[in-house]
Image (tube, grey):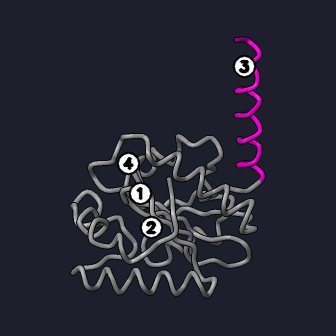
Amino acid sequence: MIKKRDLQECHELYDLLLHPDVFPFVRQKAAAYEEFLFLTKQTIEAEERGELISRTIVDEWGNPIGTINLFDIQDNAGFLGTWLGKPYHGKGYNKPAKDVFFQELFYELGMETVFMKIRKANVRSQKAAEKLPYVVKANDTRKAIYDQLNAVEDIYDLYEIPKDLYTLHLYQSQQEQDEHVLEA
């Protein structure tokens, strides 16, 4: 579902990035393929320095279809940035990719909180975030961060995924699976 970034996948990802339903919402914008290649190389190097975590989302055949990233890492927390190519919207790739990524972040890499800043105009991403049972809207509970994000203009909503709430979600999901097995 996800793998470490590499330069081999840049052509496919760049083609997907350019779609007008995707490009405006991507944090690392590239106007040319060479620029995207350079940004990907910088991303890989920044991960080696511990500044961010970046993975490629792949389909069931291993084809790159988007990226999932944790940016601005500080105090065991960071900001999530995810995008999928337009042909993969609504096909069920988002949630499983996030689940694998969150398990790596929380249980292998020691993160405690994942934040998401989502443009108020990006209704698609807001709905996707609010479907996840472990996501909390944090405009009021993390007011200082919310105010910092919107210092110039009121553009973003802030969402938070705390490790403990994600862990509770995993526990409840396992309980439900166990109950279904017992019923069968």
Residue density around tag 3, few if under 14, some if 14–19, many if 20 or more, within 10 Å = few
Q: Which quadrant of the figure has residue 116?
A: bottom right
Residue density around tag 1, few if under 14, some if 14–19, many if 20 or more, within 10 Å = some
Q: What amino acid is labelled 3 in the image?
A: Val
* Residue 176 lies within the magenta run: yes
Disc 4: which residue:
124
Residue at x-position 57% and y-position 81%: 47
Disc 4 and disc 1: Cα gap in Å? 10 Å
The disc at residue 181 is: 3
The disc at residue 120 is: 1
Q: Which sits in the foreground, 43 or 130?
A: 43
Disc 4 and disc 3: Cα gap in Å? 35 Å
Q: Nearer the viewer, mark 2 or mark 3?
A: 3
Q: Earlier in the sequence, mark 1 or mark 2?
A: 1
Q: Nearer the viewer, mark 2 or mark 4?
A: 4
Disc 4 vs disc 1: Cβ atoms closer than 8 Å?
no
Q: Earlier in the sequence, mark 3 or mark 1?
A: 1
The disc at residue 154 is: 2
Tell me which segment is drawn in magenta. 164-184
Q: Earlier in the sequence, mark 2 or mark 4?
A: 4
Disc 2 vs disc 3: Cβ atoms closer than 8 Å?
no
Q: Main secondary structure of the magenta part?
A: helix
